[in-house]
Image: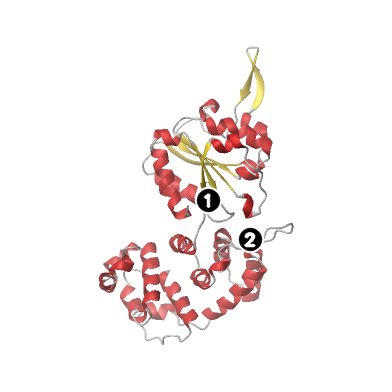
Amino acid sequence: MRIQHVTPILVKRYLNPKTRKRTVFLRGKSGIGKSDVIKQTSDLLAQHVKDWKGVIDLRLAQCDPTDLRGIPHVIEGRTGWAKPDFLPSTGSGILFLDEITSAPPAVQAAAYQLTLTPEDFGIPDTWMVIAAGNRKSDRGVTFNLAAPLQNRMCDITVDTTLDDFLNYAITQDIAPEILSFLRDRPDMLHKFEGGNNIQAFPSPRSWFAVSDVLEIDVPLQDRIEMIKGDVGEEAAIIFETHLRLWETMPRLDDILKGKPVSMPDELNVKYCVAMGLATRIDSDNFDNAWKFLENMSGDIQTLVMKLAYKRDPSIASAPAFSKWAIANAGAFSNV
């Protein structure tokens, strides 16, 4: 399942008391946004559910079996269990069991009861348990899930595509240099080789880290060294070449102010400009941006329109946008 479809499904499962009871397991590659999906789901449910407490994030790979089961103690001559204080006892929310496939078998065994009958731990039925982990084929540190545990969960395999990433990233103020780079090199969205010598590798999560690095005012070579620490040497070197393209493109500020600007000849530079505009266009400057965009190909126009609208739907009020949307109704219907 594409990761962009997961959030609405989780919301619907929560709102149905019957499906809320069954733990959902999101299985997929590291760094594709499984944790972000949980946060998005929580943010949406907070708008509709009373006494919403948010997400309790429990990293099972860092837990001991007694962390889940509790500590045995004597109550009136009988042995009982002192329940962990991090488990919820009031309100509504999501208990997120992350890294479940990286947890040792003993910890997984302790999670059996938590996934099947969370009420035994004093967790109200207004809480939904969601687990997440990697597939064995993702070549991370994983343990096979025991059949009884896996059978107690709704097991959903998730993955992402470049379009999924672009549509999400444009709403999160990611650097446009990254959007244009990945549009040109989609193979660099996620590339993990595995093996014994695991180092930094590109993933949707690590590209957001690169976006933060691009805000630091340091020489380019120092910036590339930092980027190597986030996405690895290969991706960083290729990305450096792409960054140098940005030094040759027209100034976005001039375009958005309606100043005369020459159209670049190179297609990859045109895409750099397009992605840059997609992150800057609003209802006030749209008409100026369109004066430049109308001389680009239909594919580039559609890409910019979809991403810009995803980021800021208010651009639909601009006359030039309305005119384009009417003329390209088929493309706009998929925005």
On-image quarter of the C terminus: bottom left
Q: Which residue in the protein does label 2 denote?
A: 192
Question: In the image as oriented, which residue stretches furthest toward the right?
Answer: 196
The answer to whether one can see residue 64 in this image is: no
Residue 284 left/right relative to 100: left
Q: Position of residue 293 (x, y in %)?
A: 36, 78
Q: Amino acid at mark 2?
A: Phe
Residue 317 can be seen, yes or no: yes
Please identify the quarter of the rendering in which residue 15 is found: top left
**How many numbered marks, from 0 up?**
2
Q: Is residue 209 left or right of residue 92?
A: right
**Residue 61 horizontal side relative to residue 97, left or right:** right
Within the image, what quadrant is residue 96 found in? top right
Q: Which residue is mark 1?
A: 34
Residue shown at 61% from the left, 74% from the top: 238
Amino acid, disc 1: Lys
Whichever of callouts 2 and 1 sits on the residue coming sooner in the sequence is 1
Q: Residue at x 66, y 64 (%)?
A: 229
